[in-house]
Amino acid sequence: MPTKREEGNLYLYFRILSFFRPYIRIITLVLFLNFLFIMFSTVSIWMVAPLISTIFESPDQPAASVSIVDNSGQSDTSIFDLNQWLKEKINVFFQKETKTETLKFLCIMIFLLFFFKNIIGFLQSWWVAFIEQRFIKDMRDSVYEHMLWQPLSFFSRYQTGNLMSRITNDINVLNESLEHNFTKIIRDPFMILIFVVLLISISWQLSLVASIVFPLTGLLIGKIGQSLKRKSRRVQERIADVTTVLQETITGINVVKAFSMEKYESDKFNKKTYEHFRTALRKTRLHRLSGPLSEVTGIGIMVCVLWYGGQLVLTGQLLSSEDFIRFIAILFSLMDPIKKMGEINNDIQISLASGRRIFDILDAPIAITDKPDAMVKTDFTGQISYKQVSFSYPGSEELVLNELSLAVKKGEKFAIVGGSGAGKTTLVNLLPRFYDVNGGAVCIDGIDIRDITMDSLRKLMGIVTQDVILFNDTVANNIAYGLADYSRDEILRAAKLANAHPFIEQMPEGYETMIGERGTRLSGGQRQRISIARAILKNPPILIFDEATSSLDSEAEHLIQQAIENLIQQRTVLIIAHRLSTIMNSDKIIVLEEGKIIDRGTHDQLLERSERYRYLYELQFSV
């Protein structure tokens, strides 16, 4: 079983990498292009020493061989001596009749090497960009889709701004880490390996001197990376707080202005942004420390090698001046990928902190799902039954509904009344399975709704609530939301039945008018009528009205009531209403109190015998 640290680092890292699986062929191509890039880079660096030797040797000498001859006069050409073998192969290929010709040829080859290296670098960057952007798209789509399938209880646990921050800011952090490091992760380790092999082949003694300081550097960079991971998680939490305040303020701007709370909200926002500033500053300072640390360490290594190796060259021991030049050139080239690997570690730790917040969402179980053998139900023929239903919200032990039983027959107009917190909305939310019952069962035509697919269950219902949610789209698309096959004539008919057609025709572009975020360009009554038109177009056999007219003025309520009457013909209707005038002609009314039905009957029956109903009635109609 993985330890907490393994699960938080290696396991999480491999989970992030799993999103690259669909693009394994392109990644293989990128690996091949990077291999070519490394080869061209290595050869171009290796060419520096012959070029310098050719330039600085005495001009009256013929072009010198770069092979080394031992005391016995035999050239050491063992393939196991990589340095000697490479020098002899290069000597055969590059050495010409005169130094001028050799120099000319070397210059041409160096240009071609860098030219093709950059062409290959561009091609691999082209494909890497594709992989990076598809990775971000796939991850963002996965988080969004998983979130959409969550029950309503999930959204009560997370603030809207927090969820928005995870899908935008946290995934952006992963995106930035990928943009900076995807190529480095693939290329730099191989480049470091090849450079180290070459250094050891030139002089294992100098390589040993250079390697003494590396473990200390790695330890320091590792400590910085772990600290960065913790600080990055705090930064993302703070930016989520900023997003939450921003979202709440914009959504509730009418309330803010009505209570003259601009200064209060501004101060609250400033406090959150200051907390984010402090946390981000600590993270940034620590992040910036790794660069100077790597560079100072690298310079320290170079100074040690120059001092020790320079003495060996000056005294004629161990290696030639050409090998020393080659060693220094490769060592200098090695410093950059090593420094980048330290930066990669820091970026990975930062991305892992964001990855953890993203996977918190992806790992949230989808509590309400279809059973494997769930049936598709396309009609409603009998009745809706609540059988000994008990329910409490997740994380709470308090029962909102307590062993409640009722039946609603097909074609019945069924009303639910009661005080605030009595459980009215919870009762109707159980029917489309926005939540699942804790005890008992909700049935349609005798079938437990948990045995019906959610898609077919919800297609049987139309829901109109007080808080109408419209989208920043055209009027026509909002009316036809969720429906694929519809005609303009059907939209017009639905709008007319909802008493929405007159005001829609007066809008600048009629049914093609954009209505703004949440329908802010419409009045409350207009939004409600579009919502009813949406339900009429869906044409469901079951309708749910949750206080659909409670916040409207008398004129708007009259128009809505007319629209509702047009909608409920030949349908089964469940109505929650604070205004008892809207449900007085219901076939049956139940009175809820503390999650239990305390009385039921018609309006006249309840007015005669129910003290609670009579109290609610007199509250509204007493003069």
Image: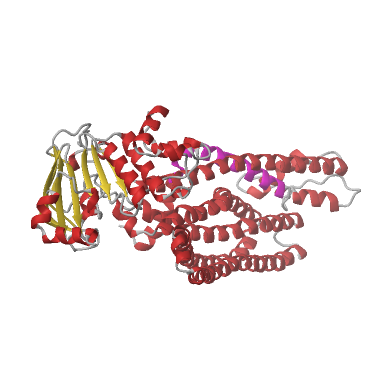
Residue sitting at 73 percent across and 41 percent down?
115
The extreme front residue here reads 623
In the picture, which quadrant includes the C terminus?
Answer: bottom left
**Front one among 617 and 220:** 617
Q: Nearer the viewer, residue 249 or 501?
A: 501
Q: Position of residue 172 (x, y in %)?
A: 51, 53
In magenta segment, residue 515: no
Image check: 412 left or right of 84?
Answer: left
Q: Residue lying at the far left in this picture: please name it.
A: 609
Say whether residue 387 is visible: no
In percent of width and height, residue 534 lies at: 35, 38
Chief secondary structure of the magenta portion: helix
Judge whether residue 177 can be spotted in this image.
yes
The residue sitting at 42% across, 29% down in the picture is 488
Which residues are the magenta region? 19-45
Q: Give coordinates of residue 533: x percent, y percent.
A: 35, 38
Name the residue at 19% across, 60% down. 618
